[in-house]
Image (cartoon, grey):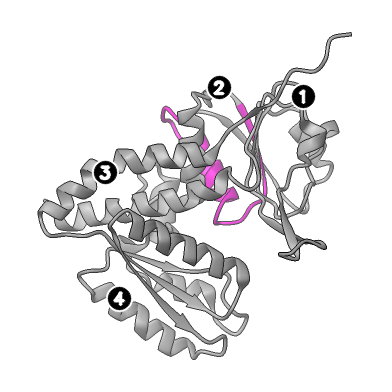
Amino acid sequence: MAGRAETRILQGKEVAEHVYSQLGSTTEKLKSKETVPGLAAVLVGENPASEIYVRNKTRRFKNLGLYSETHRYPADVNQDHLVDKIHRLNEDPKIHGILVQLPLPDQLDSQKILYEVSPEKDVDGFHPENLGRLAVGEPRFIPCTPKGILEILRYYEIATEGKHVVIVGRSKIVGRPMSLLLSLKRKRGNATTTLCHSRTQNIGHFTRQADIIVAAAGAPGMITGDMISPGVIIIDVGMNRIADDSEKGYHLSGDVDASSVEGIAAALTPVPGGVGPMTIAMLVANTVQAALRLEIP
């Protein structure tokens, strides 16, 4: 009996480095006009995952010769104080992109705070104006993680046109914008999309029909080998911390049980090293895009 085919690993780190190399000429063009793409991150509280993301973002911006600043606030910060800071960043000419790191503490109205970010500097793509533009097929900024997924598909020449894409997770950060993007009438779209979530009955019924699965539910190992069909492409967005006895005290797990889909799926993004590096790469790309739009006629 023949063994199962090997599952191809889609390396996000490799794709991210390709993106950075492509951005080089654009950033040099901006710098020649004395414009350095600049990002301001607003970080509230001490969420460990947020700390890691902002630290990695800062390191990447520095390595690329771009400008980055981080504004840290205690978890009990007054909302009006935070909104005032965002307004000042909106008016700061050296800041082209503003990132409000989520999640915010419960006492803050995350929606209201995100809405205070200027749509022209909303490099996360979460402002309702930008989400509306995305919905009608005229995006200004595509949210970073969905944009990174599209870039992985493009880099590895994985077609979406005419395919059935099942997205598991309906957050406005990944699931909902992903379903919109892939259904748009464009080259990296034209797919039939199904959006599953925590209230979907028998998710496996839908995932077994998929040509491509985007797993973004925040549930460790929920997609297993018996829930997929041979040859499916799986994009694992999950980044779940699982406590263990290691020196760090935890390991990262995706939303896909990688060992059980091995040999069934045609391709899979790893965790870590898959979608994660692409989120930062697309944050850089969106910030450069914002600087280009604002500074060069």
At horizontal 43% and vertical 31% (from top left) the residue drawn is 185
Given the image, on which type of amino acid does mark 1 rest?
A: Gly
Q: Earlier in the sequence, mark 3 or mark 4?
A: 3
Mark 4 or mark 1: which is in front? 1
Furthest residue toward top: 1
Query: Front-most of 25 and 187?
Result: 25
Report helix, strand or loop for mark 1: loop
Residue 232 in percent (x, y) is at: 69, 26
Q: Report the disc number at residue 263.
A: 1
Tell me where the magenta segment starts and ends, as one range: 164-188
- Measure the C-alpha gap from mark 3 to mark 4: 26 Å
**Residue occupied by mark 2:** 162
- Measure the C-alpha gap from mark 1 to mark 3: 38 Å
- Measure the C-alpha gap from mark 2 to mark 1: 24 Å
Q: Total marks drawn? A: 4
Q: Give the quadrant of residue 49.
A: bottom right
How many other residues sit within 10 Å of disc 4, few (<14), some (14-19) or many (≥20)? many
Given the image, on which type of amino acid does mark 3 rest?
A: Gly
Report helix, strand or loop for mark 4: helix
**Residue occupied by mark 3:** 24
